[in-house]
Image (cartoon, rainbow, N blue to C red):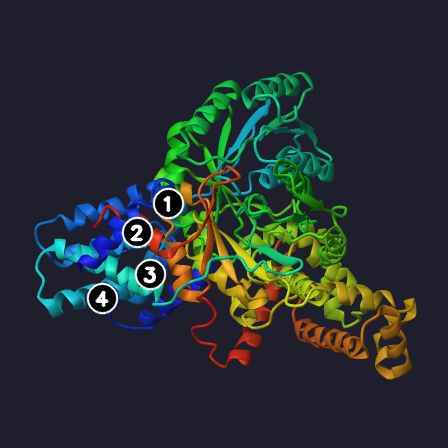
């Protein structure tokens, strides 16, 4: 995730004071110098950094903390709380109107990802709010922007309102509004052209569009990789359009994501969503607290649970858990498990939500093409072979046949056999766990317990690696 | 140190510098204007250095670079026992030139003397690859070259149409296959057609990809290989398109794309919209990949060959 590098640096800074029984003001100053640089490197706005470091210092240097119990842990808690505050404190929920149509306008610089986000938002509203959304194409400037939205609409099976590129966007907006109301849509999402915040003519145009639509939500779409400019972009758009929320895009990149941190702090505009991939379901509600925790390396179990419960049938999950622990795990189950993971989103993305897993995975690049490989190889097995994994272990001609049939090498088949074996073994260990104790709402909690020992074995430096515990 | 003043005065007359000055007005007024205020202060104390540091960091020049730069300033001041902020003006500019021109002449010309020449455009999503291709096509056609645009972004909705519309506007040849086609096969077929049509330069678009997506980067390296197999030494130019509003991630972009495809240069886009743009300097310092072109507006002719001296001059012309 985007915040990885930021959190690495933060953790380094915090590790210095961790475990110290006594802290001096100088310790805190030293730590905060590192924190300051790491935030700046992460593109967090200069002024925001200044305020943040001052706030933390002031609070951390108070007698209560320096002379209290476990001062280092308390300081870390201060950093975490302030960080979460900086990100926006409480989650700012995205609410829709129950009685009338929602009008949502997306604005932003060129290339920030408005059109893709419009599609994602339509999908989100239909899935999570049970709405019937209309997408409105108002970008008449960028070549083929309308085509892009139409194509996305087709992919989603969502209607797109477009009038080509010859009319002016204000009148298209007006027409679209009348159409949407007449046809009984629950939400209209207006995709506007990208514009520079300093382009007065284009800013006047978007103001006119706003006056016409009178949007319930004016959302600023902001690229997570934006530098120090993010703040002035946000300010300008906010001053002209009264932005109601932000959507941070491309957070699946390796950016440290300082732009996200600064947006709320400078403009007061809450971040509502984050874009985490090119697929149209890669839009997630933004939770400031969880993000703060993620930055500090505490993992994000809550987000994972959301993902799991959203995408995976609970019975499926429990059935799988039973299978796993009973030791009758076969290739059919393996395949099913893979599909479950696939449905939840990228494997790498999910692993990173598990505390400790991030460090563990650092050098093991989770390659999603591996999933495809496994699927193909299992696809080349007979039904019997899938049910009885030991058939393959015993007979090499079967392995050869499967390799030929799937187009992969025998070594690949062997690797798959090996990983099924490994899984089974891990599951056996887990078998000691009473399945009834596994919380159906949070099956990953059980998995989590499994993560810790493996991690210790691998790193040999278990202490100080597993994230912070308060 | 009057040398730089002279240099500046002579530069002022050329036409390109004027365009630079105009295009970079925002950059200058935004961040570096404050530099003037700081350097006009009465006493040279720690707060001056801190403010200079702040200004450069706000210009996205990169924390490491700025810290070492400002430390150098401090040393120079100590060494020469300077006491007025005014003295810093020329030192700053001179140090900038020293750092970024590195006594070498950077050739920003595109290597297009091949039959046909192939230019591959790569970059993350939304940086302006397609628009940059249109601008380069326009420029090359003005120089009398026959140009073919290759729609290698078969993934993003509307990407092929976008490039096609540009090719119609610019009046260049255009090659496409249906959306969803393997981009390598698009390149392969485009080369065959370009050979038949006697095209001078192929401009190959690729889908935007984040540099940390391993599969997509593998795909890019495959495209790179296919091009080289069909035409010796192709692509002759691999240009990373970089958004000037990008922060420190620009360095990571340049590094990783350089590892995968060996970049020959950078096209820095949207420079007219940012008050910062220091990422240009940070990327060059960190990777050594030269910036070859910059985008200074949305028009098809708003593309300039980059000249680092002009650029630094553009940034600091109000300071000296």
- Mark 4 or 1: the one toward you: 1
Decide if residue B319 is on the left or right side of residue A332. Answer: left
Instruction: Give the residue at mark 3.
Output: B63
Instruction: Give the residue at mark 1.
Output: B20
Gap in angstroms between the C-alphas marked 2 and 4: 22 Å
Q: Position of residue A384 (x, y in %)?
A: 91, 70
Q: Position of residue A270 (x, y in %)?
A: 43, 39
Marks 4 and 1 share the same chain: yes
Gap in angstroms between the C-alphas marked 4 and 1: 30 Å
Instruction: Give the residue at mark 4.
Output: B71
Gap in angstroms between the C-alphas marked 2 and 3: 22 Å
- Mark 2 or 3: the one toward you: 2
Tag shown at residue B175: none
Who is closer to the viewer here, A399 or A384?
A399
- Mark 2 or 4: the one toward you: 2
Q: Splitting the image into 4 quarters, where does residue A117 fall?
A: top right
Q: Who comes first in sequence, dot 4 or dot 1?
A: 1
Chain of the residue under the numbered disc 1 shown in the image: B
Q: Who comes first in sequence, dot 2 or dot 3?
A: 3
């Amino acid at each position: 995730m985007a915040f990885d590098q930021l959190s690495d640096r933060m953790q380094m800074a915090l590790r210095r004071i961790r475990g110290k029984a006594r802290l001096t003001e100088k310790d805190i100053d030293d730590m905060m110098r590192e924190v300051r640089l790491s935030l700046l490197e992460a593109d967090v706005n200069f002024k925001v950094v200044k305020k943040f470091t001052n706030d933390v210092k002031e609070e951390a240097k108070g007698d209560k903390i320096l002379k209290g119990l476990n001062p280092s842990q308390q300081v870390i808690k201060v950093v975490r709380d302030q960080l979460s505050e900086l990100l926006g404190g409480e989650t700012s929920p995205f609410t829709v109107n129950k009685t009338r149509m929602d009008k949502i306008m997306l604005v932003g610089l060129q290339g920030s990802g408005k059109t893709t986000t419009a599609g994602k938002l339509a999908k989100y509203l239909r899935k999570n709010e049970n709405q019937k959304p209309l997408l409105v194409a108002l970008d008449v400037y960028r070549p083929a922007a309308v085509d892009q939205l139409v194509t996305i609409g087709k992919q989603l099976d969502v209607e797109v309102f477009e009038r080509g590129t010859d009319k002016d966007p204000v009148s298209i907006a007006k027409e679209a509004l009348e159409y949407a109301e007449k046809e009984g849509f629950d939400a209209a999402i207006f995709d506007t052209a990208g514009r520079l915040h300093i382009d007065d003519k284009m800013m006047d145009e978007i103001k006119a569009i706003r006056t016409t639509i009178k949007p319930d939500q004016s959302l600023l779409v902001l690229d997570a990789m934006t530098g120090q400019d993010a703040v002035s972009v946000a300010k300008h758009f906010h001053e002209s359009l009264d932005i109601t929320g932000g959507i941070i895009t491309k957070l699946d990149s390796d950016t440290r994501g300082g732009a996200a941190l600064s947006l709320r702090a400078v403009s007061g505009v809450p971040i509502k969503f984050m874009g985490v991939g090119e697929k149209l379901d890669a839009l997630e509600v933004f939770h400031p607290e969880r993000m703060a925790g993620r930055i500090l390396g505490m993992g994000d179990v809550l987000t994972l649970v959301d993902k799991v419960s959203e995408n995976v049938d609970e019975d499926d999950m429990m059935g799988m858990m039973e299978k796993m622990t009973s030791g009758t795990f076969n290739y059919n189950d393996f395949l099913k498990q893979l599909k479950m993971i696939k449905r939840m989103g990228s494997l790498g993305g999910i692993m990173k939500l598990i505390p400790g897993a991030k460090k563990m995975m650092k050098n093991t690049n989770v390659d999603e093409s591996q999933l495809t490989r496994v699927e193909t190889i299992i696809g080349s097995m007979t039904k019997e072979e899938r049910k009885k994994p030991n058939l393959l272990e015993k007979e090499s001609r079967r392995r050869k046949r499967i390799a030929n049939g799937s187009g992969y090498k025998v070594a690949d088949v062997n690797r798959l056999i090996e990983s099924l074996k490994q899984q089974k073994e891990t599951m056996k260990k887990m078998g000691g766990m009473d399945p009834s104790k596994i919380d159906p709402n949070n099956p990953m909690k059980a998995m989590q317990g499994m993560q810790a020992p493996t991690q210790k074995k691998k790193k040999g430096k278990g202490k100080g690696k597993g994230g912070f515990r308060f | 140190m009057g040398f730089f003043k002279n240099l500046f005065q002579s530069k002022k007359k050329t036409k390109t510098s004027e365009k630079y000055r105009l295009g970079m007005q925002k950059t200058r007024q935004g961040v570096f204007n404050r530099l003037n205020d700081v350097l006009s202060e009465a006493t040279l104390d720690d707060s001056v250095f801190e403010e200079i540091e702040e200004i450069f960091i706000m210009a996205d020049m990169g924390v490491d670079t700025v810290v070492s730069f400002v430390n150098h300033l401090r040393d120079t001041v100590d060494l020469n026992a300077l006491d007025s902020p005014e003295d810093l003006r020329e030192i700053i500019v001179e140090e900038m030139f020293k750092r970024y021109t590195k006594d070498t002449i950077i050739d920003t010309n595109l290597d297009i003397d091949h039959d046909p020449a192939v230019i591959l455009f790569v970059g993350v999503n939304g940086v302006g690859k397609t628009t940059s291709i249109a601008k380069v096509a326009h420029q090359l056609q003005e120089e009398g070259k026959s140009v073919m645009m290759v729609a290698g972004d078969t993934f993003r909705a509307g990407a092929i149409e976008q490039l096609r519309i540009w090719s119609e506007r610019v009046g260049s040849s255009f090659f496409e296959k249906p959306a969803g086609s393997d981009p390598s096969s698009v390149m392969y077929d485009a080369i065959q057609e370009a050979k038949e049509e006697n095209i001078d330069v192929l401009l190959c678009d690729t889908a935007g990809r984040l540099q940390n997506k391993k599969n997509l980067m593998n795909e890019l390296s495959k495209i790179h290989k296919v091009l080289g197999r069909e035409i010796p030494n192709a692509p002759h130019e691999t240009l990373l398109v970089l958004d000037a509003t990008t922060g420190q991630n620009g360095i990571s972009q340049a590094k990783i794309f350089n590892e995968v495809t060996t970049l020959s240069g950078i096209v820095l886009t949207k420079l007219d919209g940012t008050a910062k743009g220091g990422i240009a300097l940070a990327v060059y310092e960190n990777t050594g990949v030269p910036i070859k072109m910059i985008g200074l507006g949305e028009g098809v002719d708003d593309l300039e060959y980059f000249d680092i001296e002009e650029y630094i001059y553009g940034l600091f012309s109000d300071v000296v």
